[in-house]
Amino acid sequence: MGGTQSVFTEDELDDYQTLTYLSKKEILLVHKRFKALDPASVEADKNARLPMEKIRELPELKVNPFRDQICKVFSSSGDGMTFEDFLDMMSVFSDGAPKNVKVEYAFRVYDFDGDDLISESDLKQVIESLIGSNRLTEDELQQLIDNIMDEADLDDDKTLSFAEFEHVISKAPDFVNSFRIRM
Amino acid sequence: MNSLKKSNKIAPMPPSSPADHAPDFCTEGVNLGHLRFSLGNIDACQDWKQCVQHIKELPSPISTKRLLLKRFSRKWSIQTDVGTMTKQATTKSQKFERFVSDVTYSLTLWTSSIRAIEGVHGSGVASYFTFLRWIFGLNLALFTLLLGFVILPMGLLPETQRDLIIYPNYNKSIECSRSYTVDEGTGISLLFSLLEGKGWMEKTFMFYGYYVVRLEHHYNLSLSYIMTVIACLLVSLILMTKHTAHSVKETIISSNNQDVKVSSQVLVGWDFSLSSSQTAQGKQLGVFKEFEAAAKEEMYLRDRTKRLTSKLSRCKLYLIRLLVNLVILASLAGAGCLIFSVTTLSTKYTFQEKKQSKGNSWLSLLITYLPSITITFCNGFLPVVFDSLVSFEDYTELFIIKITLLRTVLVRLASIVVLVVTLFTQVRCNAALDCTGSSSPDCAHLKCWETYVGQQFYRLVITDFFALVGFVLLLELPRMFLCSKFKLLDPIGPPQFKIPPNVLDLIYGQTLVWLGLLFTPMLPGILILKCFVVFYVKKLSALVACPPVKKSYRSSGINRFFMLVLLAAYVLCVLPVIYTMFNIKPSRGCGPYRVYDSMIESVQVAIETLPSFMAYSYNVVTSVAVTGTIILFLCVTIFFMSLVVSAYRENNKRLRDLLMKEGRNKLQLLKQINMVRRKSPAKVSNVNEGQSTLQDVDY
């Protein structure tokens, strides 16, 4: 990986290692993937701000039904992602990131309206994203949402707070495995 | 670092709440984007390292974190300017950790292959491949140990036997060693010998029989042989514990996940690692089907209770289940008998043939391999029968998976147990004789029973390897090919990559290594090669032969089960190995223990040569008083731990109640907010603050 090594100085790499859960090799690999999304602009500026359309071209995001939410959550400015945003995202999705960090971001991804609560309408959007072009009847959908609320909504306020969300996720052991993008 | 200057202006998240409840200069102008994360945590840090850890965990963009890092470093009066800041943040130990993680990352095999497979099949199938890689690494470690302490010393140390005269069995062993000869063979029979592990193979590093007693240059080969085998078993246990500790913890936390079944189906519904659009579509359909199936399962249960209201139909169902279980038990017993008789027959035939004349070499190859083939066949065929029988029993979907898996495991373990018992009876039968004695008609006369046992495991590993490769190349690939060509075969469909049987295959392979280690020191080396080839064959199977499964596979509950199976298999393997070390008389004519009465005697003899003080302490440590105390101490610890566990459980319940109460409080508060808001909109900001403190408590 001699060619990419020169992209960052040792200090910058040290910096990134302090602030993310990635190793040096992984950081360089992330940069390689970032560069592949738009070689020309990244060549000009290694921390270039790529528009969302380019970011969505990442294979894992392209097929992910929550791609818009993910882009929104990780973009620091709201339009497009810089390399640092991208690195942030890959760090959270890496094997090294602890569960609580992953849970935090998962909560934000599922919180479509951004009110820091997962409401019934958020859940509806989650389910609809998950099943894609397939359709559940209105009754089935409502039944599903009711079931979730029965299980997870401890205080009966018809929304999931972060604490309730974390409680549910802590009981689903598959979470850490599924909330992951391999480098 | 331009971004550092920029970050002041960046306001990361919409809900703009300047973190005004932490009026520290460090946090000035920093928007954490979240009420839940106050900077109080970082302020309260004991040292700089902890502070960095906290900043790292914040869910904010890198630029914000960098800014915080800089400010807090000022607070901790750490000299900073932009360039050297992170140098201060990383200590030497962290540097070393990073170096290690870099090295391990670049040494990790198959990362991109596993990524490609995960992209198509999801994390469930990928976990099979990571497990395969783990087995590969485990055997690499075992093989390195054996190579360093047994195989290389054996090859390098010069051969003299001057010290051995002190042993009382010396003359006998010389005599027996002379009578232990092998037929080297020529031409094609060399190849047969390689496959059978006989002939010239017996006189290689592969088998126990080749090793001799060596005491040169203060290196005691007999001692190091037994110690290395014990070390290998311990290393396996440690690595296994390390590997499973995390997942066991996870599964214990989620042990009662039945009450969040739907939530986890939805909230953990997507596999973020998927990258193939075809699979993603399949996954969406799968999730959809799963949601539907959840409703159906409910209906099925209701339906069944309705059907079973009449006593007659219930009796019929129970009768069927009883019958099916009887059939399964009968087939298990049949398989056991088959393995026993085939193994005995094969041994007898081999020795008769040796006595009389050279028979047909193909026939003899087949007969030598008959036990291994029978066992592998039983392992492969019986689960298929069980699979088809279970449909008569009218269980729910989830239970079907569990019971079939349980029965499959039973077959695997039972076949190994039967083999070990069979070998044991043969060895016992042989132990009464010495090398020159004539054999009784009932038992085969084994000149070096350790090598004979080792050969069995050697053949089993090889048969298992060919079965695995053959299954993919001769069954799965043609099936895939035919299914894509002919519409007629649609009801059969293309093959599926089923995780449970594949994982059981791996566990079975490892079991053979643990059992055979003592008799075939090169066995881990063979398994390394096997894993290497199997990885690529299975990759072929996953990426070419098996289309992604629509139905999503939940690994959670099953993973714990696999760990239990691996542990059970380990115990099952260690028991006979330890028993052999202590209680079975080694062959006089071969191996590093030919002058001893038991393998463990080599340790005792070595201890006696030590200074008396050390020998005395060894005797003390192994005495009943000390071991008894240790066992007692362990029992007390276990009891104490179980108390702690139950206390935690209690605490957990209380916290959950607290959470619910807290939530109700919040609801109450929200109502009040609304009332206040209606009265005067200006006070809203104060209330916001109140809410944030509440959520801090929540968190």
Image (tube, rainbow, N blue to C red):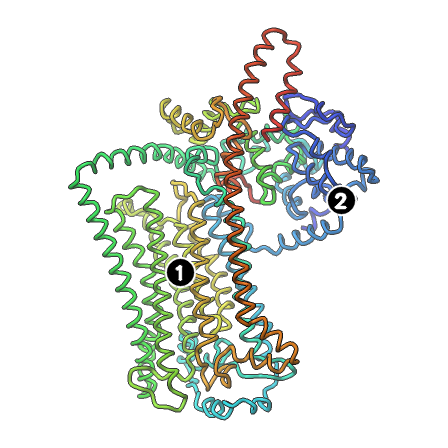
Mark 1 neighbour class, 10 Å CA radius: few under 14, some 14 to 19, many 20 or more? some
Report the side of A100 relative to B404 (left or right): right
Query: Quadrant where the C terminus of chain B lies?
Result: top right
Residue B672 lies, in percent from the top left, at 57, 14
Task: Tell me what residue is drawn at x 20 percent, y 49 percent.
Answer: B320
Task: Tell me what residue is drawn at x 31 percent, y 69 percent.
Answer: B339
Q: The residue under label 1 is which amino acid type?
A: Leu
Number of residue marks = 2
Q: The residue under label 2 is which amino acid type?
A: Thr
- Report the residue marked by disc 1: B468
Report the side of B40 relative to A92 (left or right): right
| Nearer to us in this view, A85 or A113 | A113
Q: Is residue A128 above or below residue B622?
A: above
Task: Tell me what residue is drawn at x 44 percent, y 66 percent.
Answer: B573
Report the side of B479 relative to A20 (left or right): left
Q: Secondary structure at mark 2?
A: loop
- Report the residue marked by disc 2: A9
The quadrant in which residue A34 appears is top right
* Chain for numbered disc 2: A
Q: Which residue appears farthest toward the left when viewing the image? A: B312
Q: Secondary structure at mark 1?
A: helix
